Image (cartoon, rainbow, N blue to C red):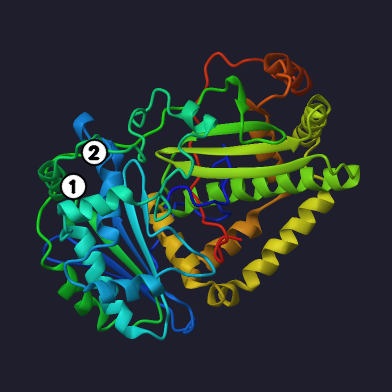
């Protein structure tokens, strides 16, 4: 889903593969078997015989979240998962306990439910050698999807629950940078973790549930070593009785563009200074080879930029400086943040070092040796594509699928990926990459400084002015909204 970490960066060059006269449509990976029931309920199944011992992954996506709530319904989307998690119309309490004792991956635990502004996600992870649990899991998910048990007892139990079983996306909705991002957007005032107003009217809660939990707005994803011939019938048996159809149009969850402002934030969760340079862009789906190539040139440029800075830090041997790159697609906006973490008192010097390195990279380009090393690595990774795909676990495969579906990105088969990727690498030159670097590093960025609470506040405007002087940037009167590139989930066996 949204929020999964992605390998993504920004750019402005629409690269055409040599000899390609027009964009080639991307074809959905046929390994994912898809179907729809008569009531509109969608399902997708990926059979993974190459991973027989992996856990079987199930994800139920309901296209509703806190944006659907009116003022008097605040907190309903947060409350509903708490009700359905530990109650079931189809399973006895013993069977439900048995399901939950096995439905969380001990190595990579996910919250059973995640609530966001425009979706609710239910996640189960089952042992591969417990086939009886799969049927119980389908029945429980069907109960959650349209047969929830709303009684004074289940409501009281839900109200006493902590927040460990239900999470939000974004994970920290009180993060100060996220609160800034919400300004001017349709999301403002609709936080997904708000508690419902007391006392709760049970009839109104049921009505809200029936209005927004409709089968035509749900998709079940299953990945694992399952029988893709019989599983569709099992899905039909569990979900075909669901009733209802969405009549009320949902508000589109969309962030507003992030201006290249200078922002200072004091946080009680930070222990060191963090300086973030953030590029913010409009979101553009990917469905043909031209846009895919656009993504690839941006992606490899991002990697080259990050590697260049990391190698510089290694030569500098300054362990007080730490770099990170955090890129994501959220609600029709894409962003990439270059984060510099350093100890108190070292910030100005660290900022000047970072700016000088970026200027050198922008004006002189990537050293030829670093380009050759990166290019050779990408060729080697492509030659191991099918082996990497075979070693990709089912949890990564299903999460990648959800991310692609959420972002309107065609999840292509490895065969088409290999052919298009080889053509892209054959056309890639240092000049192309350096043009993209220059384009990226000539854009204005949001400049955000987060300092620990209790530390003497720095003048963030003065820090920004010093940064601009080094970068030789002047404020742009008219900011052009550059299209963003599509996401690839990380780790990703297909996108190296």
The picture places residue 185, in percent across and down from the top left corner, at 37, 27
Q: Quadrant of residue 318?
A: top right
Q: Quadrant of residue 219?
A: bottom left
Looking at the rendered structure, the secondary structure element under dot 2 is helix
Instruction: Please determine whether, in this image, residue 127 is positioned above or below residue 349.
Output: below
Q: Give the crowd class for mark 2: few <14, some 14-19, many >=20 residues within 10 Å.
A: many
Q: Give the crowd class for mark 1: few <14, some 14-19, many >=20 residues within 10 Å.
A: many
Instruction: Please determine whether, in this image, residue 202 is positioned above or below residue 289.
Output: above
Q: Are marks 2 and 1 in contact (CB under 8 Å)?
A: yes
At a point 47% along the width and 54% down the height, the residue shown is: 289
Viewer can see residue 62: no
Instruction: Please determine whether, in this image, residue 2 is positioned above or below residue 140.
Output: above
Q: Earlier in the sequence, mark 2 or mark 1?
A: 2
Using residue 35 as the reference point, say whether residue 338 is left or right of it.
Answer: right
Of residue 496 and residue 161, the one placed in the foreground of this image is 161
The picture places residue 352, in percent across and down from the top left corner, at 81, 26
Using residue 425 as the reference point, say whether residue 173 is left or right of it.
Answer: left
Residue assigned mark 1: 212
Of residue 190 and residue 181, the one placed in the foreground of this image is 190
At a point 42% along the width and 24% down the height, the residue shown is: 183
Looking at the rendered structure, the secondary structure element under dot 1 is helix
Indicate the quadrant containing the C terminus: top left, top right, bottom left or bottom right.
bottom right
């Amino acid at each position: 889903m949204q929020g999964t970490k992605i390998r993504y960066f920004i750019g402005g060059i629409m690269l055409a593969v040599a000899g390609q006269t027009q964009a080639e449509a991307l074809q959905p990976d046929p390994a994912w078997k898809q179907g729809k029931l008569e009531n509109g309920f969608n399902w997708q199944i990926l059979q993974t015989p190459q991973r027989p011992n992996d856990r079987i992954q199930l994800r139920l996506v309901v296209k509703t979240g806190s944006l659907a709530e009116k003022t008097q319904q605040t907190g309903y989307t947060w409350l509903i998962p708490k009700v359905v998690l530990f109650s079931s119309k189809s399973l006895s309490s013993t069977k439900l306990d048995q399901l939950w004792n096995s439905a969380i991956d001990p190595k990579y635990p996910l919250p059973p439910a995640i609530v966001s502004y425009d979706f609710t996600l239910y996640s189960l992870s089952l042992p591969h050698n417990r086939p009886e649990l799969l049927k119980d899991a389908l029945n429980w998910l069907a109960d959650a999807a349209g047969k929830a048990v709303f009684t004074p007892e289940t409501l009281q139990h839900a109200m006493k629950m902590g927040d460990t079983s239900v999470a939000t996306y974004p994970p920290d909705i009180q993060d100060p940078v996220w609160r800034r991002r919400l300004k001017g957007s349709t999301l403002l005032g609709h936080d997904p973790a708000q508690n419902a107003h007391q006392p709760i009217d049970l009839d109104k809660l049921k009505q809200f549930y029936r209005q927004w939990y409709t089968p035509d707005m749900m998709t079940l994803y299953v990945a694992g070593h399952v029988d893709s011939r019989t599983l569709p019938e099992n899905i039909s048996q569990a979900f075909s009785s669901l009733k209802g159809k969405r009549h009320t149009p949902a508000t589109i969850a969309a962030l507003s563009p992030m201006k290249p402002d200078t922002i200072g934030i004091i946080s009680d969760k930070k222990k060191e200074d963090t300086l973030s340079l953030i590029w913010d862009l409009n979101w553009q789906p990917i469905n043909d080879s031209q846009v895919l190539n656009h993504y690839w040139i941006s992606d490899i440029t991002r990697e080259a930029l990050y590697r260049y800075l990391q190698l510089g830090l290694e030569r500098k041997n300054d362990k007080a400086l730490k770099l990170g790159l955090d890129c994501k697609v959220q609600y029709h906006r894409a962003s990439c943040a270059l984060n510099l973490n350093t100890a108190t008192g070292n910030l100005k010097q660290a900022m000047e070092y970072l700016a000088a390195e970026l200027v050198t990279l922008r004006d002189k380009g990537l050293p030829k040796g670093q380009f050759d090393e990166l290019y050779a690595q990408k060729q080697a990774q492509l030659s191991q594509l099918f082996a990497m795909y075979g070693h990709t676990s089912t949890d990564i495969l299903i999460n990648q699928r959800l991310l692609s579906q959420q972002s309107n990105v065609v999840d292509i088969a490895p065969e088409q990926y290999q052919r298009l990727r080889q053509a892209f690498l054959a056309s890639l030159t240092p000049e192309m990459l350096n043009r993209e670097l220059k384009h990226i590093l000539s854009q204005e960025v949001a400049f955000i400084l987060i300092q620990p609470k209790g530390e003497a506040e720095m003048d963030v405007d003065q820090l920004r002015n010093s940064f601009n002087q080094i970068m030789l940037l002047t404020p742009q009167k008219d900011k052009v909204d550059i299209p963003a590139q599509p996401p690839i989930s990380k780790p990703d066996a297909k996108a190296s």
